[in-house]
């Protein structure tokens, strides 16, 4: 009888512990959610770097450290994805609403990015423009895609003309609203989707990225000065 009580007590404790774990998981705190986001970022970093030779992986790690040191969180976010190392800047950091001319305040941010990029001259670079899905009404652009192409080109031209980054090192793509990173149903999500991304690409990806740019340019409006 005594032994049966002990077994019941142990089983009950185990059930309570399991229930506690279940409740804890179901009611995750903001800290827990941030931990999961950090783990996800670390996984992307691992997957990206695992594809590279040791020397090039070290180069991307070093570039990430430098970008994070020099850019504030309000200026850009820095992380890995399947393309490479990405510095993501929201549109209001670089442009006025509906415009593709760089704001004067954008120069300071791009200057800091350019100093890092120049330390890695062997890495191909991508510059991508992205928008939300709201129709163009008053800015005069033919489409969101046209605006995204113009913005990507504006950033690339600044890096080339002001900092001497070789034109052959940079490929630009304007995706319009094709690749949202948040829901366009909410204002906050649309704000995140309006962005420019500068990508430090693996050397092996340079050619395929250029081919992707060619494919996208043939699908829609291209930008010419």
Image (cartoon, helix red, strand yellow):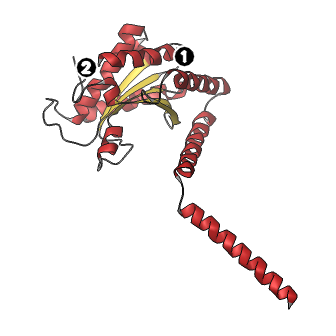
Neighbours of disc 2 within 10 Å: few (<14), some (14-19), many (20+): some
Residue reaching furthest to the bottom:
1
Residue 189 percent coordinates (x, y): 34, 44
Q: Is residue 70 above or below residue 38?
A: above
Per the image, label 1 sits on a secondary structure element best described as loop
Asked if the residue under mark 1 is in contact with the one under mark 2, i.e. CB atoms within 8 Å, the reply is no
Q: Which residue is mark 1?
A: 120
Q: Quadrant of the N terminus?
A: bottom right
- What kind of element bears circle 2? loop
Where residue 136 sits, quadrant-wise, is: top left
17 vs 125, left or right, is right
Say if 56 sits above or below 135 in the image.
Answer: above
Establish if 118 lies above or below 60.
Answer: above
Q: Which residue is mark 2?
A: 101
Whole-percent x and y of residue 33? 53, 50
Classify mark 1: residues with Cα within 10 Å, few (<14), some (14-19) or many (20+): some
Residue 96 shows in the view: yes
Residue 14: x %, y % from top left:
72, 73
Seen from the viewer's position, the closer of residues 6 and 104 is 6
User: How many numbered markers are drawn?
Assistant: 2
The relative height of residue 207 versus residue 187 in the rendered view (above or below) is above
Left or right: residue 162 versus residue 45 is left
Quarter of the image with the C terminus in it: top left
Q: Is residue 214 visible?
A: no
Residue at x-position 73% and y-position 74%:
13
Residue depicted at 36% across the width and 39% down the height: 192
* Residue 65 horizontal/vertical position (percent): 58, 25
Please name which of the two marks, 2 or 1, marks the residue nearer to the observer. 2
Q: Residue furthest right?
A: 2
């Amino acid at each position: 009888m005594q032994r049966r009580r002990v077994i019941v007590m142990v089983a009950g404790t185990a059930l309570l512990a399991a229930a506690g774990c279940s409740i804890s998981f179901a009611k995750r705190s903001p800290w827990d959610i941030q931990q999961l986001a950090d783990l996800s970022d670390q996984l992307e970093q691992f997957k990206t770097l695992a594809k590279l030779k040791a020397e090039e992986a070290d180069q991307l790690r070093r570039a990430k450290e430098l970008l994070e040191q020099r850019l504030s969180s309000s200026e850009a976010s820095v992380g890995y994805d399947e393309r490479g190392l990405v510095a993501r800047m929201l549109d209001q950091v670089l442009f006025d609403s509906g415009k593709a001319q760089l704001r004067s305040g954008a120069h300071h941010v791009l200057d800091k990015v350019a100093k890092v990029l120049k330390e890695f001259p062997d890495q191909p670079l991508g510059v991508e423009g992205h928008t939300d899905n709201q129709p163009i009404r008053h800015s005069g652009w033919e489409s969101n895609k046209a605006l995204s192409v113009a913005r990507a080109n504006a950033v690339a031209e600044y890096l080339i003309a002001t900092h001497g980054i070789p034109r052959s090192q940079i490929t630009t793509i304007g995706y319009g609203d094709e690749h949202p990173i948040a829901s366009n149903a909410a204002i906050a999500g649309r704000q995140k989707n309006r962005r420019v991304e500068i990508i430090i690409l693996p050397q092996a990806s340079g050619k395929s990225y250029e081919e992707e740019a060619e494919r996208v340019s043939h699908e829609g409006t291209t930008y010419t000065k």
